[in-house]
Image (cartoon, rainbow, N blue to C red):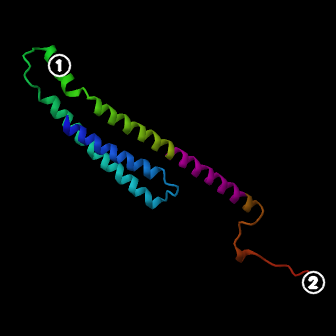
Amino acid sequence: MVKQEALFQEILAISREQLEFCQQDNLEPENLTGLLELISQRQSIMDEIDQLHSSLMSVQPSTGLSGKAADVTNSVQHSAPNGKLIEIIEAIKTNDNACMRQLKKKSDELMTLIKQTRANRQAADAYGQGNSIYDAWFVDKKK
């Protein structure tokens, strides 16, 4: 359980970094690699937790109980999280929800900007301003 708690602490630290990253005002495409790296680190820790959990489930101590009673007791001993672990998981969940809200907000802002750009381009094309400078012509009315 100590190893599992330490792994969840690492995920909590990564989730805090993700939240800080998502709260930045200027998310540029080249900065998104940092977010992808954090996600990759988090996935590897989650894989470690899965391996740890499966190894704990495969090793069942002898409790003197037989059959289903022993299975239920061992399952509860290995899978029941302590209060500290629950607090860590809740903190991770809170950070993840805040991060998702920030990313959704930024995504909505980007969609609005794209729609405005399309509308402006269509208006410019409709009024003939979509042409380049080299396509322009000048009419001298004095002659």
Q: Which residue is mark 2?
A: 142
Asked if the magenta segment contains residue 108, the reply would be: yes
Above-or-below relation of 52 to 28: above
Q: Position of residue 12 (x, y in %)?
A: 33, 43
Q: Quadrant of residue 3?
A: top left
Residue at x 34%, y 48% (from the top left corner): 14
- The label on residue 73 is 1
Main SS of residues in magenta? helix
Asked if the magenta segment contains residue 66, the reply would be: no
Q: Inspect the image, locate mark 2, and give the three-letter code of the amino acid beneath it.
A: Lys
- Residue extending farthest right: 142
Residue at x 69%, y 59% (from the top left corner): 121
Q: Quadrant of residue 138?
A: bottom right
Q: Nearer the viewer, residue 139 or 74?
A: 74
Mark 2 → mark 1, Cα distance in angstroms: 101 Å
- Residue extending farthest front: 84
- The label on residue 104 is none
Above-or-below relation of 85 to 142: above
Q: Inspect the image, locate mark 1, and give the three-letter code of the amino acid beneath it.
A: Thr
The boundaries of the magenta stretch are 103-122
Direction from residue 34 to residue 47 in the image, left or right: left
Above-or-below relation of 121 to 47: below
Label 2 neighbour load within 10 Å: few <14, some 14-19, many 20+: few
Query: For the residue labelled by badge 1, is the local secondary structure a helix, a strand or a loop?
Result: helix
